[in-house]
Image (cartoon, grey):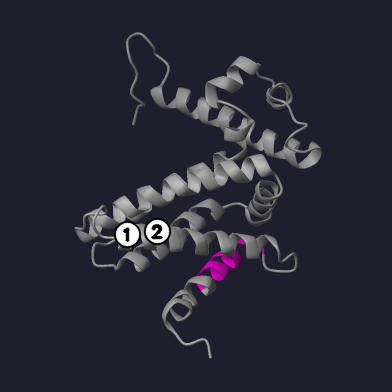
Amino acid sequence: MATPTTAADPQPVGLRERKKRRTRDALVDAAHRLFLCHGYGRTTVDEIASEVEVSQRTFFRYFANKEEVALAVLAEAEQSFLECLRARPAGENPLEAMRGAVREVWQAVGRGQESGPAALELFELIESTPTLLAAHLRHAIQQEVEVARILAEREGLDPAADLRPRLLAAVFGTVVRISHLSYAAAPDADHSMDGMLELIERHFDQLGPALAGSWR
């Protein structure tokens, strides 16, 4: 089937978008390599752009600053999580829906590539860089608000009057972050996507007992 075209632009519409995506992905990859090699603070936008053989102006078409390119992978994962959560079966309870959405996102990230070590390096970079950690935590708070809104819509609740959606979103986000920290702190662990998913599931399995069970 032919790709749609326009009279003003005979080039396939999808081709331009694929080229833009390749450039964006190349900038993200180059930025991560340079950050890990030279440090976040010592890496410049010019160096990232030069690594991909594009201009600084081209870089700023895709990213507002170094912080945004450093967090791009996690930002995409967070957006994918929201989309997966909205699409989860209506019969699932909130925690089941969120666990299922996290599983979908990690499976998609790891499909067809060795993403475990790369994810580990990214977590370590963020946790060891105060500027990035602060930005990441700001984004996490924004994510909690959106997750709470989606949960409230799924359950037919008013999030301004019912505390459960925001509370569960905050707890859920904390569990995911603790899972990531445990993942990064265990150099001898299985750093494949399957290993990461197993670790996340183990943390969620302990959520109920930790909140409601006896610790003695």
**Secondary element type, mark 1:** helix
Q: Residue, x 35% and y 8% (percent of image)?
A: 8
Q: Amino acid at mark 2?
A: Ala
Query: Which residue corresponds to the image point at 37% horizontal and 49% vertical from the top-left?
Result: 145
Three-letter residue code for mark 1: Pro
Please give the range of residues in magenta. 191-201
Q: Residue furthest left?
A: 156
CA neighbours of label 1 inside 10 A, class few (<14), some (14 to 19), many (20+):
many
| Label annotation for residue 169 | 2
At a point 41% along the width and 21% down the height, the residue shown is 12
- The CA distance from mark 1 to mark 2 is 6 Å
199 drawn magenta: yes
Q: Nearer the viewer, residue 92 or 142?
A: 142
What is the number of the mark on residue 46?
Answer: none
- Left or right for 158, reference 50: left
Closer to the camera in the image, 103 or 212 = 212
- Residue occupied by mark 1: 165
Q: Can the viewer see residue 35?
A: yes
Q: Position of residue 86 (x, y in %)?
A: 31, 52
